[in-house]
Image: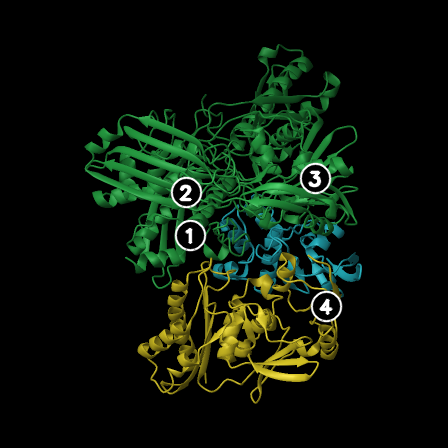
Chain colours: A green, B cyan, C yellow
Amino acid sequence: MSTVTGYKVIGTRPVRHDGADKVTGRALYGADYAAAGLVHGSILRSPHAHAKIVKIDTSKAAKVPGVLAIVTAADLPESGDRMVDVGEGPQPLSHIRGNILALDKVLYKGHAVAAVAAASVHVAEEAAQLIEVEYEPLEAVLSAPAAMKPGAPILHGDTNVALHVQHVKGDVEAGFAEADVIVQREFTTSTVHQGYIEPQNGTAFWSSDGRVSVWTSTQGSFVVRDVMAAVLDVPVSQIKVTPMEIGGGFGGKIPVYLEPVAALLSKKCGRPVKLVMSRKDVFEATGPTPGSFMRVKIGAKKDGTITAGLAYLANEAGAFPGGMVSAGAMCVFAAYDIENGKIDGYDVMVNKPSTAAYRAPGAPNAAFAVESLIDELAEKLGMDPIELRLKNAAKEGTRRVDGPKFRRIGLVEVLEAMKAHPHYNTPLGGPNRGRGVAVGFWFNIGLESSCSISVNSDGKMALIEGSTDIGGSRTSIAMQAAEVLGIPVADINPSVVDTDSIGFTNVTGGSRTTFATGWAAYEAALDVVRQLKERAAKIWSVDLAEVTFDAGVLKSSAGTMTIAEIAPKLNGTGGPVVGRATVNPKGAGGSFAGDIVDVEVDPETGKTTILRFTAVQDVGKAIHPSYVEGQLQGGSVQGIGWALNEEYFMREDGTMMNSSFLDYRMPTILDLPMIDTVLVEVPNPGHPYGVRGVGEANIVPPLGAIANAVSHAIGVRMTSLPMNPPAVWKAISTK
Amino acid sequence: MAGKVHVQTTINGQPAEFLCEPRQSLLEVLRDVLGLTGTKEGCNDGNCGACTVMLDGRIVNSCLVFGVEVEGKSITTIEGIAKDGELHPLQQSFLKNAALQCGICTPGFIMAAKSLLDQEPHPTEERIRFYLANNLCRCTGYDKIVRAIQEVC
Amino acid sequence: MKSFDYESPKTVAAAVALLATPGKTVHALAGGTDLIVQLRGGRREADLVVDIKAIPELNQLSYDAGTGLTLGAAVACCRVYEDASLKRLYPGLVDAVSLIGGTQIQSRASVGGNLANAAPSADAVPALIALGATCVIAGPNGERNVPVEEFCVAPGKNQLQAGELLVALKFPAPAPHSGSSYLRFIPRNEMDIAVVGAGVCVVLDGDTFASARIALASVAPTPLFVPAAGAALVGKPVSDAAIAEAAQTAAAAAKPISDMRGTAEYRTHLCGVLVKRALNEAVKRAKEAN
């Protein structure tokens, strides 16, 4: 598939279609949903990190005036167990159900146990607190190493190790034997949260004819539908999910938490029930990303050639399996052409909330370890850190340690852009300062998308698709259709619609939306063109073969017609024209990202200030450059928070002590400089416009880049995140 | 225990009145009682600024004001910023400069930025960042938000 | 949040009567930026909330060179830092009120409330102590005055009895050649609770310290006044050595705990750093003042 240059729409920066609504407060997010008869729910959550549920007594709660319904796990149908696709992979139904409402055991503090619906959210909250639950507390385990020890408290079955994945390439022992320099360290990262500003929400209405309607802020309406169908034992076609606008997700709004509970409450009281999480519940009862323990060893020859890489990755999966270590294992050495590699990855269950995807899940942890060691190698070899990476950089045809060969990728271009950037060539200029670089990889996915385009009588189009829009994607999707149709993107009106109105569309995640749903829009637009050509041939009474279409104009020996000219004729010449397409593209192109960061550390307090940050990424083709830049900036800043201050501060009993934005310290606007971006475009040959997913790769390098910068600034290698002021000061003062 | 209190106030230049329990925050009143859902809840404890409104000319976190406290006062919400269907220059600049991704923090930022520019028409970058430190954004990394505000200065 | 009644009295006497309501848990509401969070989170409960913002004495903000500054307990931080003369006269106080939370918090939070909430980490209190402020308290038995350093008795607890109301804070007029400063350490640049805070006020006699008051936040169950640290400076020439000694004396008096905001060891170390930096700033201001 060739990529075309000289685009008219692609690469421009139009105002997004939903923009006016979003800057005026008119856009409706999930918690904004209102309906006649709407009532509110409140969830009772476990105070214990690990305990058996002995008995639940709801009688006191039921007596509270205004209470309309109460549910527990006993109200969930016992529909056995099977695998359910929850977007980006299958999970056992018993796990999904068990996380939504605990049945026999609670597995983390905050695990949902019961729920109440009442006309006032305050009454629902008060009533929920009157539900009496008898627990038999069990010992809790809170870290992967501890959970893997013999004798550790077990969450499910007979081991806490949910998954062991191993990749072997070549012979690592031989590889290390060849090496002149070997570096090896242990690294730890803490549990961190995606930190979306909008808490989870969902409204459900179970009508007397058995249909369930849902309004929710989600990254995947069809996943919500599928999960609810499985959990509630209701046919998929009886559930309609209407996606509201969504206030951030980053992977954390792919799992389903509230909607089935709201539906159960609605079934009992016959009213629409809205559930909205508090910020505390978001921290304690959704899906943060795994904390991890890693041991990595890399060997290289004097000339910088890496000869072997060995990685041991243990990720905390939380209360249920799924700690993203598979993805971490795919990405850990992805940037390097290594002949000999061995990777062992473990997903380990612990008594913390069940982890969910957070922007390139598993990869930032692994890259923190590897990029730190590459930095140390560069120091030991006396090589420039970018040169060392260039020397070993993965290219088209390189075989990753986990098996696949890269198609066309842009790592070398990213590294060259970093090397040439003015940032890299400006002196640091001061004491207590350090510069760090790092790179990272994310593979990106394809998966299913659908799109439909209707031609209106004025020649403008309505485009409907099912990818919930977290960052301007409805516009970048419309831009790809506009490019095909040769019309301005403002002449296409994109909408994100419900699960009855469009074909199956997988989650907004995995950096797939602009790639796959954009492709569906591209194909739907081609379908429109095909139909318009057929209609023009009919109108002109010419052979179809002689009708051409270019830049929005149909032409034949009989004359020309713009889309605006043929549009009013459509109904009278055979009927409306609606283009449609469904795709499941396989050609997702991986994205490499790289950062250069300068820091200054106050040696008396250990506080790190980010002086300058440059984020570089191979974006394939930037459909809307402003929103692509925004992805690089957003992921970089999440990485800054993860590196410097964010962590779940856990008490020994499994209580998160800092479940608020006060003490879960995400970067504020005052903590940052401008984030400069460089969009490197190495088009993905697997997409008509060369699109690579861009949303995730940018969170992979910041942890390593900042760790390298801080380590240089203070002269001590930092191997544990976050590098908060007390940790940095401790490193300085014990140096 | 008393029931609901009748409150009379001014919202976006228009007289408004409502009934609320004393424990209901101004945020809850705006969203659930008056249907003005443009003001958002992010944390309900004053740390994210998504609920920012102007109260007697000053920006406040409406989650930390009770509905009963606004008797006789004047409130401006995001719904009152565009005038007669025309977006305020800040709103236009946010759109032009792609200063929003998911948009949930945007109403709060626009309220706070407008408050700053109303008092100081030409703030430095440092001053913009200091003034807006109570407004969290998780999507943009703040870069384009600062630039959007600077463009209107 | 538990249901409560709400009253908005217009006089001190009416407020005192409401606060003294027998058999009910009553809380005074100023800015609400602490109380509302606590009521919502279940840390405090109320049967009755008494809004004190409509009482004139609690909103006064007046200065005269003879009696000094009277700061009503409900006056919001923003009114303090917007007053150019206060920045000149009591810069340490302005430092503190500019740091509490962020702009939206500062529109509502009051200095009196920051003190009455009695958190060991309260940002305003070290500055109040350093500036020698006094609490004016009204109650069923009349009015009484208490130095700020005695007002907080335990974490989250002040010495107000049933029916008592903090009405105002009084500050002596600043002595000639005096300067004050408040610095705190937080991991980010704003919006955090102080890991350690240091409020200082120095009076210079030429190039010598005539007197100094030093107080600390977040290193003891209550904000901590360290008279010994200030006393260590009296009569000493302004120098790095004298300042370092005072900083060490302050650090030695600190009894911090380890919690998620910092270890005891780290906090003790920070005391020394912050007192040193705050003293340097206060000296600079004292020299610039006339």
Q: Chain of mark 1?
A: A
User: In the rendered image, is residue A180 in sight?
Assistant: yes
The label number, if any, that marks residue A71 in the structure image: 3
Please name the amino acid that badge 3 sits on. Val
The label number, if any, that marks residue A146 in the structure image: 2
Q: Is tag 1's residue or tag 2's residue first in the polypeptide sequence?
A: 2
Q: In this figure, which residue is indicated by the disc labeled 1?
A: A644
Secondary structure under tag 4 reads loop
Q: Position of residue B134 (x, y in %)?
A: 56, 58
Counting other residues with Cα less than 10 Å from the Cα at mark 1, is it few (<14), some (14-19), or many (20 or more)? Answer: many
Task: Please tell me which residue lies in front, A139 or A16.
Answer: A139
Please name the amino acid that badge 4 sits on. Lys
Quarter where residue C290 is shown: bottom left
Is C84 on the left or on the right of C269, as rendered? right
User: In the rendered image, is residue A423 in sight?
Assistant: no
Q: Chain of mark 2?
A: A
Labels 3, 2: one chain? yes
Indicate the quadrant containing the C terminus of chain B: top left, top right, bottom left or bottom right: bottom right
Q: CA distance from mark 1 to mark 2?
A: 25 Å
Indicate the quadrant containing the N terminus of chain B: top left, top right, bottom left or bottom right: bottom right
Q: CA distance from mark 1 to mark 3?
A: 41 Å
